[in-house]
Amino acid sequence: MLYSTLRAIFHFLFRTLYRLKVVGIQHIPRGVPVVLCANHISNFDPPLLGSPLVDRRVHYMAKAELFDVPVLGWVLPRICAFPVKRGGVSKESIRLSLKLLKENNIIGIFPEGSRHNAGGMGKKGAASLALKSGAIVVPAAIVGNYKLFRRMTLVYGQPVDISEFADAGSEGLEQATDKIMAAIRSLIKEYESK
């Protein structure tokens, strides 16, 4: 209930305050596990990424310290966020992510790892989860800079097939991550000029 209400409020605010344009929503498949991978430019990215998706919830990892903040610690689990320790993903977070994917949910991941690594190298977690679970990888691009009444664009790209890297070990994870990051960067480049 809280998730649906907040999703609708955020979507209204993003459309009103940032003139949000959503492209490619048809690329989010229904009834299958999805790892939704996007660039990370702001604390607003998680609610932005999931707000257009009326019939599917997006689950996120959030740094564990946020769950200790009064009020926020109560809200986060109710909006499909779960804790992850900084400096590395805990086994609990991986297990929960795989469980959610097995149940055909969407996991939202920012492969850059933080807002301060925008445009940098991606981390291998998204590729690892997708390969272990058989989830579909959907790249997404957040284009704009959250300036009031300036156009923001959220682009959901066509799924990226990384199955060729399933048995390639650590090097394969790096190549799969590079392929995901290339898809995200391609969407950013395409829509920055529009």
Image (cartoon, rainbow, N blue to C red):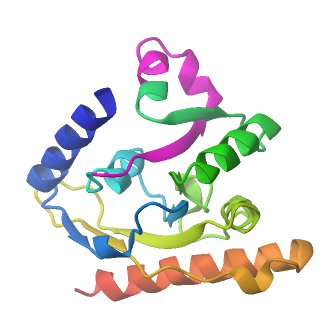
Left or right: 48 with respect to 86? left
Count the marks: how many? Answer: 0
Q: Does the segment drawn in magenta span residue 69?
A: yes
Residue 178, horizontal then vertical, whole percent: 68, 80
Left or right: 67 with respect to 174? left
What residue is drawn where x is 48% and y is 58%?
A: 40
The residue most toward the top is 70
Q: Does the segment drawn in magenta span residue 53?
A: no
Between residues 133 and 46, which one lies in front from this camera angle? 133
What residue is drawn where x is 54% and y is 26%?
A: 66
What residue is drawn where x is 52% and y is 64%?
A: 37
Indicate the quadrant where residue 82 lies: top right
* Quadrant in which the C terminus appears: bottom left
Between residues 68 and 50, which one lies in front from this camera angle? 50
The residue most toward the right is 169
Residue 7, horizontal then vertical, whole percent: 26, 41
What residue is drawn where x is 52% and y is 44%?
A: 60
Indicate the quadrant where residue 127 lies: bottom right
Q: Is residue 111 above or below residue 7?
A: below
Indicate the quadrant where residue 132 lies: bottom right
Left or right: 46 with respect to 122? left
* Quadrant in which the N terminus appears: top left
Residue 34, horizontal then vertical, whole percent: 53, 62
Q: Is residue 27 above or below residue 103?
A: below
Q: Which residues are magenta?
A: 55-75
Residue 135, horizontal then vertical, whole percent: 61, 65
Q: Is residue 41 above or below residue 28?
A: above
Left or right: 50 with respect to 184? left
Q: Is residue 45 above or below residue 137?
A: above
